[in-house]
Image (cartoon, rainbow, N blue to C red):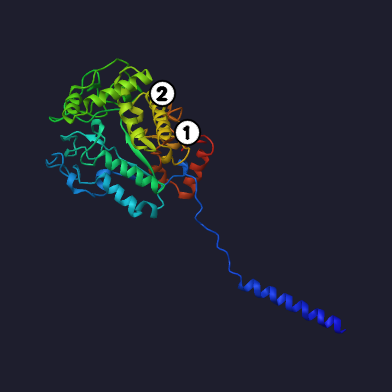
Amino acid sequence: MKAKFLLIVLSLIVFLNCESKKKTEPVKEVSQNVEKPFVWEAANIYFLLTDRFNNSDTSNDTIIDRSKETGVLRGFKGGDIKGVTQKVEEGYFTDLGINAIWMTPIVEQIHGATDEGTGLTYGYHGYWTKDWTAVDPSYGTREDLKALVDAAHAKGIRVLLDAVINHTGPVTKQDPVWPSDWVRTEPQCQYSNYENTITCTLVKNLPDIKTESNENVELPSQLVKKWKAEGRYEEEVAELDEFFKRTGHPRAPRFYIMKWLIDYITDFGIDGYRCDTVKHTEEFVWEEFKTECDYAFAEFKKNNPDKVLDDNDFYLVGEVYNYGISGGKFFDFGDKKVNYFDNMFTSQINFEFKWNSKELQYETLFRKYDNKLQNDLKGYG
């Protein structure tokens, strides 16, 4: 009996000791900072109009004289590349959960202004190119762009620039029309079929690049004059010679522009392009552009191994105006359907959302989109 009593007491002591240890041992916290892989299909992309986002450097606001009185909000307002970098470094985008920034074009815009019916307008939006090889001084410098990409990448944020191949900027007194073997100035697009949506000008006074041409053309005289004045003519010509030798492409207008656009990949390591006015350019142009972008991105990674973020491919998203997800992979011109996902774009902008968001409850809307993305558009976005 005594032995049983001692055994019970001993058991209680051991049990209480164990309970005491359980209560006093600190709870180990599991870290929540698990690094997540970046996937474009799940990216949170912030779109910004470079000129309207943040003015961090007032010294470049009037570096080009664009001082004529304009229509309401139709002129430059001072936003610049440094302004974007400032917000990146402050954590503005990170706090919003943003991991990709899409910026409007930063290439040099026409210096003059034109009236398209909304009042005198300058190219503040970035879609009226004067020189694809230069950053517009009102936005900043090449050094500013490099600093932005580096700062964004340091925060795990990808950078998408905007690419325009379809047209130059409007013609003004300061911005002469490009040569006739480069552009057409008529007819104006009617948008009723494939042909009169592509081989035409989007609007009056917006010269259309002859993207269908395979004829060798010389550099526009205004570019030659500009580059010589800036002291970089020989460098630009040498780079063009190297590009055409490597690719074997004819010196046709579209290939000059492709070369100038992929330079922003090899020189700065941008992560993707949002391509403008896609349906107004022959689809083979975008296949060729994708090939050149992929090559340039691979070259950047090879030459800058310390700056490689992941093994993702270069990202291309197409602006096929009025494309809707209900059409699946195809856009219908009325007389022809085109699949712009076919070796061209990973994603397209869904213009249908504007109407769907008004007509459908959100749960119904996103169930519809999920069904499309998991079936007809599997692997695309």
Neighbour class for label 2 at 10 Å: few (<14), some, many (≥20)?
A: few
Q: Quadrant of the N terminus?
A: bottom right
Residue 88 vs residue 7, the one in the foreground = 7
The amino acid marked with disc number 2 is Lys
Q: Which mark is residue 313?
A: none
Residue 321 in view here: no
Percent across and percent down for residue 9 are 78, 81
Percent of width and height locating residue 93: 36, 51
**Residue at x 26% of width, y 26% of height:** 236
Instruction: Tell me the quarter of the picture where residue 215 sits.
Output: top left
Please, is residue 260 above or below residue 106 in the view? above
| Residue 142, horizontal then vertical, whole percent | 27, 38
Q: Provide the residue designation for mark 1.
A: 328
Amino acid type, residue under disc 1 in the picture? Gly
Q: Position of residue 325 (x, y in %)?
A: 45, 37
In the orientation shown, which residue stands out farthest toward the top?
215
- Which residue in the protein does label 2 denote? 336
Would you say the residues marked 2 and 1 are in contact, meaning their CB atoms lie under 8 Å apart? no
* Image: 248 above or below 361: above
Specify few, some or many for label 1: CA neighbours under 10 Å numbering under 14, 14-19, or 20 or more. Answer: some
Q: Tell me which residue sits at (86%, 81%) in the image.
A: 3
